[in-house]
Amino acid sequence: MKNAKEILSAYKAGTCTEEEKKLIEKWFLLNGAGINSDLSDRDFLHAGDDMWEMISQNKGETLVPVRRNLFVRISIAASILLVMSFSAYYFLSSSSKNANQQLVNNVVPGGNKAVLTLADGRKISLTDAGNGEVVVQQGLRIVKDTTGRVVYELPASEESIGLPVKYNTIATPNGGKYEVLLPDGSKVFLNAATTITFPTSFAGLKERKVKLNGEAYFEVVHNKSVPFKVEMNTQEIEVLGTRFNANNYADEPSVRTTLLEGAVKVFVSGGLSKEKGPNVILKPGQQAQLMKGNLNVKEVNAQTFVDWKDNVFSFYETELEEAMRQLSRWYDVKIEYKGKIPREHITGYIPRAVPISKAFLMLEEVSDMKYSLEGKKVIVSF
């Protein structure tokens, strides 16, 4: 295998393979994971400068570093992942020398953690369950596969039997995430502090309805005759087959539905009357925002709203307070503010696999905030 310098040189010359290109981008994002790095910090910085210049020249994009943003995107024609990742590596490397006291009292990032509640009320820790069959209920096998996700397996011979509808609930805590393969084959990725409730089988039902609190990314199997619906406290999403993200955390000011592929219809819930209120149909790249009963649609970079499932915090003109809420849920910490919180916006990427100290050191580099860590409490001063 080529060493880091050889791959970087090939990248600059435009002669590296697609596999090497992906490897180098992942390396920058995850601070060298997956590659045998023989670069010093100085070499790394020079390599980052070279690639920054190359991307600007060859892709027609100007990338401007500023203090309030990790990097500002002037043209949205090309990806800034590589340069952003280089920025993250630089911040982590240069800041860690002065952060030994924070590393001693650190908080590790979240991971695969969830609790399964069966129809009879039994609770099973999916965090502790080994791979293989977790439980069998009415012919349905619930399995934890080798990737750690939960799979609902209903044998074909059982699907025609009119079994009573039973519901399961999977809940992730703060600092948790989980992937679920529903009985119809649809994939659901749960973010931290999220709960989803769903039938153990969709056989014989007129609709595939699940209930969500928190945030989840869906990849829904197409079935026009049995529409898929996501019910939340203040809205409902109807979909035939698509990829989308739904966010309805109670501590966020708005409920957001972001569409990546296909089409969804978003309804405002009618409250106790059960009648549906105003609705919008989203196209890929659009986001519905429900705030104080008002439903609006805006164009967004949809991918940035689902990067969390790939273990990356992705910020684009994100308010600092919102970024803090995301960090709070993932690291399972309480954030206490001292001083007036500025209306700052940040843009950039932070790997969700880094300890909390490194994540906050990166934020210190791009804002006026300073932080200290006391157990499970982060004190942010301005």
Image (tube, rainbow, N blue to C red):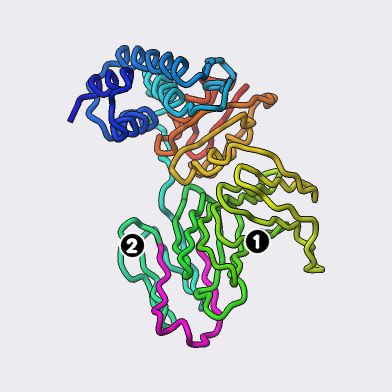
Where in the figure is residue 167, as x and y percent of width and height?
A: 54, 74
Question: Can residue 179 be seen from the camera position used here?
Answer: yes
Q: Name the residue under label 2.
A: 145
Q: Residues within 10 Å of mark 1 (few under 14, many from 20)?
A: some
Q: In this view, does 26 lie above or below 41?
A: below
Q: Does the magenta stretch include residue 36?
A: no
Residue drawn at x 53%, y 37% is: 377
Q: In which quarter of the image is residue 2?
A: top left
Where in the figure is residue 240, as x and y percent of width and height?
A: 59, 62
Q: Give the number of marks.
A: 2
* Sequence-first disc among 2 and 1: 2
- Magenta segment range? 150-170
Secondary structure category for the residue under label 2: loop
Q: Which of 46 and 326 is in front in this view?
A: 46
In the current view of this chain or complex, which residue is farthest to the left?
A: 1
Q: Residues within 10 Å of mark 2 (few under 14, many from 20)?
A: some
Q: Name the disc covering residue 238, or none.
A: 1
Q: In this view, does 200 lie above or below 311?
A: below
Q: Quadrant of the N terminus?
A: top left
Residue 268 is left or right of residue 302, and the answer is right
Callout 2, which amino acid? Asp
Q: Quadrant of residue 74?
A: top right
Callout 1, which amino acid? Glu
Residue drawn at x 63%, y 21% is: 382
Residue 200 is left or right of residue 264, and the answer is left
Q: In which quarter of the image is residue 28?
A: top left
Q: Distance between the residues labelled 2 and 1?
A: 29 Å
Where in the figure is residue 59, as x and y percent of width and height?
A: 47, 21
Mark in front: 2 vs 1: 1
